[in-house]
């Protein structure tokens, strides 16, 4: 694999091999330093906590040197073009670019301009493929086989790049997916996936409730009615069946889509998702290794 820009186009065998590698990295503490003497550049033009830190640790565990660009302190603020910034990082000696950007398609552009391997760490409202892989690995370790598992993604699906990747990845794993939210947050084209505005009408059938943050920075608006209709507090969580779990990619808007008791409660897999961020990103970085020049 030269680059990892999207979950689209990955088949079951590709996902299974990334899942298996992630599981191996979860178990083992000492790793082959497959990226020894390689350089991974973290280029986060948008805010990030868990994705950036887990990429950094993943790259370091595999033996890579890590360059961490801070756009607020770099020449981007002096008017340097994105292309010039990326070409500069390439000339300094990066082998892999991990790119997050507010605009969709920047990871592909980065690959075209520099010729380097690129990992998409979130582009606009389009895709966040390593987060989807993290979530698939989290589900696999909790439930085992995913075929027939009923997952409801709840909230601001239209603006969510995490949902943009999950919508492609989960069905490949045999998951039965339903998108849940107010009309203005549901995608305009369903692509064959079930959708509903009625959370309480489907809640009892769900094995997994995957909550999303309302993305105010991408123009979404939220009012009190939203929390009443779609927020998860202990009352709504009590309507779930016994073995159902709650997931969320973070960052959480506590009191909006999720209450404290639910976020910190026994059904929550939120910190498992965070913990899986490192082995999954190690698996993705290692999968690119054979394509490096
Ligand atoms: C998400 C992101 O930035 O795409 N967070 C993450 O990477 N875990 C989701 C969000 O911003 O709500």
Image (tube, rainbow, N blue to C red):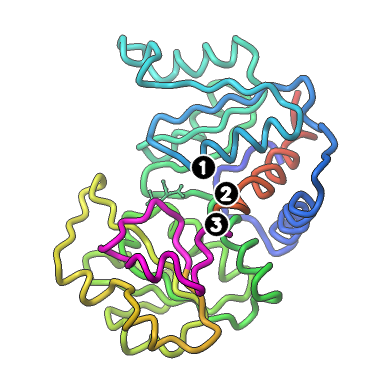
Helix, strand, or loop for circle 2?
Answer: helix
Q: Position of residue 196 (x, y in %)?
A: 32, 80
- Spatial CA distance of label 1 from label 2 is 9 Å
- Spatial CA distance of label 1 from label 3 is 12 Å
Would you call the spot at circle 1 few (<14 residues within 10 Å), some (14-19), or many (20 or more)? many
Question: Is residue 192 visible in this depiction of the protein?
Answer: no
The numbered dot on residue 130 is 2
Residue bounds of the magenta highlight: 247-272
Instruction: Please name the residue shown 76% across and 28% down the image.
Output: 63
Q: Circle 3 is placed at which residue position?
A: 132
Q: Circle 1 is placed at which residue position?
A: 51
Q: Disc 1, disc 2: CB below 8 Å?
A: yes
* Residue 240 position by quadrant: bottom left
Q: Is residue 239 left or right of residue 172?
A: left
Q: Is mark 3 within 8 Å of ligand 1?
A: no
Q: Is mark 1 within 8 Å of ligand 1?
A: yes
Is residue 45 magenta-colored? no
Of the numbered discs 1 and 3, the one sitting upstream in the chain is 1
């Amino acid at each position: 694999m030269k680059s990892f820009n999207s979950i689209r186009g990955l088949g079951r065998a590709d996902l299974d091999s990334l899942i298996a590698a992630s599981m191996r990295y979860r178990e083992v503490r000492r790793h082959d330093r497959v990226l020894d003497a390689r350089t991974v550049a973290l280029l986060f033009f948008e805010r990030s906590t868990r994705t950036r830190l887990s990429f950094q640790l993943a790259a370091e565990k595999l033996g890579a040197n890590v360059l961490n660009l801070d756009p607020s302190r770099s020449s981007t603020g002096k008017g340097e073009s994105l292309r010039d910034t990326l070409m500069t990082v390439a000339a300094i000696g990066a082998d892999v670019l991990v790119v997050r950007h507010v605009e969709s398609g920047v990871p592909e552009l980065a690959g075209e301009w520099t010729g380097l391997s690129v990992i998409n760490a979130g582009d606009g409202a389009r895709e966040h493929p390593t987060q989807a892989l993290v979530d698939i690995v989290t589900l696999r370790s909790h439930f085992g086989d995913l075929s027939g598992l009923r997952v409801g993604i709840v909230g601001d699906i239209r603006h969510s790049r995490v949902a943009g990747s999950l919508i492609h990845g989960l069905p490949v794993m045999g998951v039965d997916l339903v998108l849940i939210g107010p009309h203005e947050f549901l995608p305009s084209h369903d692509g064959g996936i079930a959708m509903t505005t009625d959370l309480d009408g489907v809640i009892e059938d769900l094995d997994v409730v995957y909550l999303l943050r309302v993305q105010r920075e991408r123009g979404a608006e939220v009012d009190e009615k939203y929390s009443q209709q779609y927020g998860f507090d202990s009352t709504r969580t009590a309507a779930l069946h016994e073995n159902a779990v709650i997931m969320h990619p973070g960052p959480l808007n506590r009191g909006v889509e999720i209450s404290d008791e639910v976020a910190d409660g026994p059904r929550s897999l939120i910190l498992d998702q965070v913990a899986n961020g490192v082995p999954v990103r190690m698996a993705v970085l290692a999968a690119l290794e054979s394509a490096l020049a």
